[in-house]
Image (cartoon, rainbow, N blue to C red):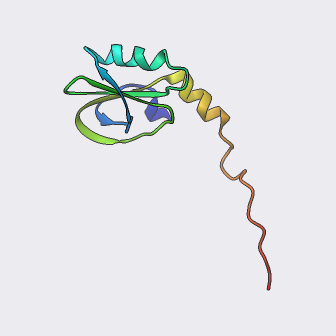
Amino acid sequence: MPQMMVPRNDWDNLSDQDEGMFASVDECRSRCKVQPGCVQYSLNQDQLCRTRGGPRLGKATEGITSGWIEDRIKDFEQSMAQCGSESRPTQILT
């Protein structure tokens, strides 16, 4: 998740919870940080701030600045099972 460690200009991380209008991306980030479950935020060119509880990388989109709350992303990453540790379905022979 290294792509989620720094804010990105012209990037939409698909945050979907409208938080209202904010003067700066720093204010939008602060709005996210006061919400315990929030892990990411975005601010569009109209100054609309959006947040999200689950991390999404997103896609290139002009006019949007996106960021992530780094310590919460790291916590999320550490809580995930390692790849390959998933249980495999039992094969049924007929």
Q: Is residue 92 left or right of residue 21?
A: right
Q: Is residue 8 visible?
A: no
Q: Residue at x 73, y 50 (%)?
A: 85
Q: Which quarter of the figure has residue 21?
A: top left
Q: Is residue 9 left or right of residue 29?
A: left
Q: Residue at x 60, y 34 (%)?
A: 77
The answer to whether residue 72 is above or below residue 86 is above
Horizontal and vertical percent for residue 79? 67, 34
> What residue occupies the far bottom of the structure in this picture?
94
The answer to whether residue 3 is above or below residue 24 is below
Residue in the foreground of this view, choosing between 71 and 29: 29
The quarter of the image holding the C terminus is bottom right
Horizontal and vertical percent for residue 7? 37, 25
Horizontal and vertical percent for residue 43? 29, 26
Q: Which quarter of the figure has residue 47?
A: top left
Q: Is residue 81 visible?
A: yes
The answer to whether residue 18 is above or below residue 23 is below
The answer to whether residue 15 is above or below residue 26 is below
Q: Residue at x 49, y 36 (%)?
A: 55
Count every numbered label the image shows and give the total. Answer: 0
Residue in the foreground of this view, choosing between 38 and 68: 38
Horizontal and vertical percent for residue 62? 21, 36
Q: Residue at x 49, y 27 (%)?
A: 39
Q: Which quarter of the figure has residue 67?
A: top left
Residue in the foreground of this view, choosing between 45 and 67: 45
